[in-house]
Amino acid sequence: MIRTTLTAAALALTTLAAPMASAGGSVSFEVNPSNADEANAIRLGLAIYQIARAAEGDAHVYQNGNGNGAGIGQSGGYNQGIVHQEGNGHHGTLAQNGCDSYGIFQFGEGTNANVAQGNGCQTGMLFQFGW
């Protein structure tokens, strides 16, 4: 009885998952701090990323793949912006207005992100995975 139920459940999940996987799509999650310590930890993590990549300046774009597009616009001082794209067909833009820190990390195929930070001193990270 249990074996029959498990077999039926596995077959149902396989049948449902096959069209979704072939249809394409993406999943995203964003990390935003809830206090100053978390914001400082994100800033530190982004700084370590930039050191590991030997990035110079306040804006860094890394692309590995084909058909990717990225842009970072910054005004004011003390901004830290990263767009990291692994795979093909990604689009990512980041606008910062001063004292902002943010990283967009895109993996797989065909993700899209447009992040605008206003009023200064905002921090966060966005992770996207596309298929």
Image (cartoon, rainbow, N blue to C red):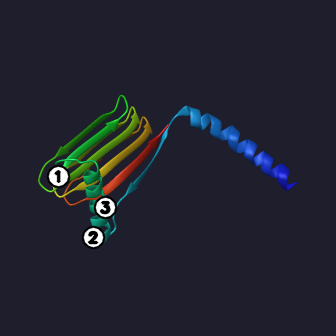
Secondary element at image label 1: loop
Q: Residue at x 22, y 47 (%)?
A: 55
Residue contact between numbered discs 1 and 3, judged by CB atoms under 8 Å: no
Q: Nearer the viewer, residue 26 or 64?
A: 64
Q: Name the residue under label 3.
A: 42
Q: Quadrant of residue 44?
A: bottom left
- What is the C-alpha distance between the residues marked 1 and 3? 18 Å
In the picture, the quarter occupied by the N terminus is bottom right
Type of amino acid at the residue the image marks with label 2: Ala
Q: How many other residues sit within 10 Å of disc 1, few (<14), some (14-19) or many (≥20)?
A: some
Question: Which numbered disc, 3 or 2, marks the residue closer to the eye?
Answer: 3
Q: How many other residues sit within 10 Å of disc 2, few (<14), some (14-19) or many (≥20)?
A: few
Type of amino acid at the residue the image marks with label 3: Ile
Q: Residue furthest top?
A: 67
Residue 106 location, x and y as percent?
39, 43
Q: Which residue is drawn at 39% across and 39% down?
A: 86
Q: Which residue lies furthest to the left in this view?
A: 76
Q: In which quarter of the image is residue 62?
A: top left
Type of amino acid at the residue the image marks with label 1: Asn
Q: Which residue is drawn at 31% across and 61% down?
A: 42
Pointer 1 or 2: first along the chain: 2
Q: Name the residue under label 1.
A: 97
Residue 114 location, x and y as percent?
31, 43
Q: Name the residue under label 2.
A: 36
Residue 71 left/right relative to 8: left
Q: Residue at x 84, y 55 (%)?
A: 2
Secondary element at image label 2: helix
Question: Which numbered disc, 1 or 2, marks the residue closer to the eye?
Answer: 2
